[in-house]
Image (spheres, rainbow, N blue to C red):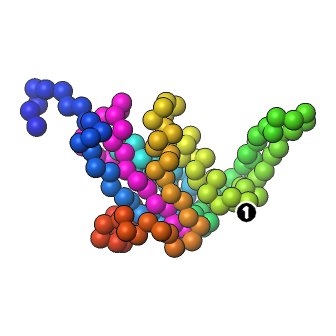
């Protein structure tokens, strides 16, 4: 690479890699930052902020995530249904019981940039509650790069 020229990573030149992450016993926020960096491609030397140079991430054992402090009991997710007096609230255990991947996906999405690329990047995140997943063929040399 010539150091006198500016390097721009093009989508055609980038081949995404697959990363397998075991989430059992890991803290949600710290794991979310690792996943966001992998989805954006910030771990690679050819990272370009405006280019799509991210990777695929498969997260297994998402139901065994850990929250520090009293966040598991005190943290609330609030949303509005659109109806009159339709404000809903749910704690972390209630949300995990209803949808096991919501908590981690919500944390990762909050750490991605607010632009058009974020939707493409979050689509490359695959979350599974247990250790079985259908992406073993994509991950070369299974078990792949464990983060």
Q: Which residue lies at the image location 49% right of the left edge and 53% below the top edge?
A: 125
Residue 33 visible, this orientation: no
Quarter that holds the C terminus = bottom left
142 w.r.t. 115: above or below: below
Q: Which residue is mark 1?
A: 97
Q: Which residue lies at the image location 11% right of the left edge and 31% below the top edge?
A: 3
* x and y, in percent, of residue 93 in the image: 73, 60
* x and y, in percent, of residue 55 in the image: 37, 50
Q: Report if residue 51 lies within the magenta region.
A: yes
Q: Which residue lies at the image location 52% right of the left edge and 31% below the top edge?
A: 114
Q: Report if residue 141 lies within the magenta region.
A: no
Q: Closer to the camera, 144 or 12?
A: 12
Say left or right for 18 vs 92.
left
Per the image, label 1 sits on a secondary structure element best described as helix
Q: Quadrant of residue 28?
A: bottom right
Say left or right for 87 vs 67.
right
Q: Which residues are magenta?
A: 42-61
Residue 123 visible, this orientation: yes
Say left or right for 9 vs 128.
left
* x and y, in percent, of residue 21 in the image: 44, 63
Q: Closer to the camera, 123 or 92?
A: 123
Residues packed near mark 1 inside 10 Å, few (<14), some (14 to 19) or many (20 plus): few
């Amino acid at each position: 690479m010539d150091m006198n020229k500016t390097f721009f990573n093009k989508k055609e030149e980038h081949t995404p890699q697959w990363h397998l992450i075991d989430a059992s016993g890991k803290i949600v926020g710290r794991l979310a930052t690792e996943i966001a960096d992998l989805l954006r491609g910030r771990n690679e030397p050819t990272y370009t902020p405006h280019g799509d140079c991210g990777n695929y991430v498969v997260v297994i054992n998402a139901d065994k995530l850990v929250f520090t402090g009293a966040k598991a009991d005190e943290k609330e997710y609030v949303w509005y249904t659109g109806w009159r007096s339709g404000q809903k609230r749910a704690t972390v255990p209630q949300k995990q019981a209803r949808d096991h991947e919501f908590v981690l996906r919500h944390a990762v999405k909050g750490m991605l940039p607010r632009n058009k690329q974020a939707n493409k990047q979050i689509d490359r995140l695959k979350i599974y509650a247990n250790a079985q997943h259908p992406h073993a063929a994509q991950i070369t040399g299974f078990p792949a790069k464990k983060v």
